[in-house]
Image (cartoon, rainbow, N blue to C red):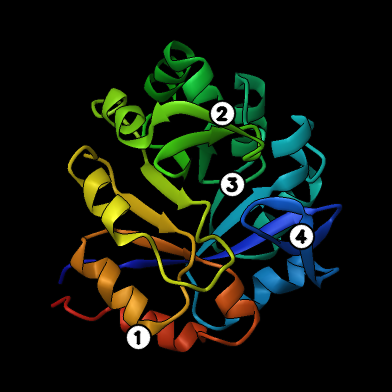
């Protein structure tokens, strides 16, 4: 039996709370819970096997403000944890892996220091994820505050042979908009990606999940649609098995 599309419910951490930002804008924050551990346990109880965590404070400042909270989630659940936000040196990698995180998303440092990222991929094979956050096809860094002139496809191609756990592609324009994923961008990236490809941004319906299977991608991150009841975990998981035998 082929593996189904992985569903990664998202928890974005800011100030110790579970929030969502609109298109990565820290000024457009919605707080969904003051207890992220309880939210993680909820997704697990509803059938999730995976959890995508973003430390928004660390993404902006580089300081691991929510590391204790991430460790608490790891201890409280059996979920496979994928964590991004502010992973900028090997000490940070070691600390999060020691805290119970399965794989780490690196974005800013991968584009700013590609040689370092390649070394880290070799040292921690299949534990690091290339985070590709893009606006209008160009890579954004530093918590989406800066947009580079590096095309997303070029960044992905540059690390094609690295032993990555995955590539996570986030389309900033669709993130938090419940408008559907950027399928054309994902199809373009698929040409350059050997590692599993995970889609993020705009996913809000069973139809979106079916479209992602057709791309194909290997997983998708779902945030706002789950929190606002547009898409249930049960329906997302059922849709993730569509087309798999």
In the image, residue 114 above or below residue 85: above
> Picture coordinates of residue 208 (x, y %)?
35, 75
Q: Determine whether label 4 and label 1 are within 8 Å by CB.
A: no
Q: Label 4: how many residues lie within 10 Å, few (<14), some (14-19) or many (20+)?
A: few
Of marks 2 and 3, the one in the foreground: 2
Q: Which mark is residue 7?
A: none
> Gap in Å between the C-alphas at discs 2 and 3?
14 Å
Of marks 4 and 1, the one in the foreground: 4
> Picture coordinates of residue 232 (x, y %)?
51, 86
> Gap in Å between the C-alphas at discs 3 and 4?
22 Å
Among numbered discs 2 and 3, the one appearing first in the sequence: 3
Q: Is residue 183 left or right of residue 104?
A: left
Q: Which mark is residue 83?
A: 3
Of marks 3 and 4, the one in the foreground: 4
Among numbered discs 1 and 2, the one appearing first in the sequence: 2
Q: Which residue is mark 1?
A: 238
Picture quadrant where residue 76 is located: bottom right
> Picture coordinates of residue 24 (x, y %)?
65, 51
């Amino acid at each position: 039996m082929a593996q189904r599309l992985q569903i990664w419910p998202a928890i974005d951490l800011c100030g110790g709370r579970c929030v969502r930002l609109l298109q990565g804008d820290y000024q457009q924050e919605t707080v969904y819970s003051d207890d992220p551990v309880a939210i993680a346990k909820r997704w697990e109880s509803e059938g999730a096997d995976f959890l995508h965590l973003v430390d928004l404070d660390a993404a902006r400042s580089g300081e691991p403000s929510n590391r204790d909270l991430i460790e608490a989630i790891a201890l409280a659940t059996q979920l496979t944890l994928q964590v991004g936000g502010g992973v900028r040196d090997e000490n940070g990698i070691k600390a999060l892996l020691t805290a119970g995180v399965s794989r780490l998303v690196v974005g800013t440092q991968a584009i700013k220091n590609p040689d370092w990222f390649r070394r880290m991929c070799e040292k921690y094979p299949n534990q690091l994820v290339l985070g590709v956050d893009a606006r209008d096809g160009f890579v954004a860094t530093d918590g989406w505050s800066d947009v580079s002139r590096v095309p997303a496809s070029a960044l992905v191609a540059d690390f094609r042979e690295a032993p990555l756990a995955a590539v996570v592609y986030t389309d900033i324009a669709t993130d938090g908009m419940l408008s559907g994923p950027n399928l054309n961008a994902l199809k373009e990236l698929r040409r350059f990606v050997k590692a599993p490809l995970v889609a993020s941004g705009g996913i809000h319906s069973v139809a979106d999940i079916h479209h992602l299977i057709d791309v194909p991608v290997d997983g998708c991150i779902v945030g706002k649609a789950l929190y606002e009841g547009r898409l249930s975990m049960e329906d997302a998981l059922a849709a993730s098995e569509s087309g798999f035998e």
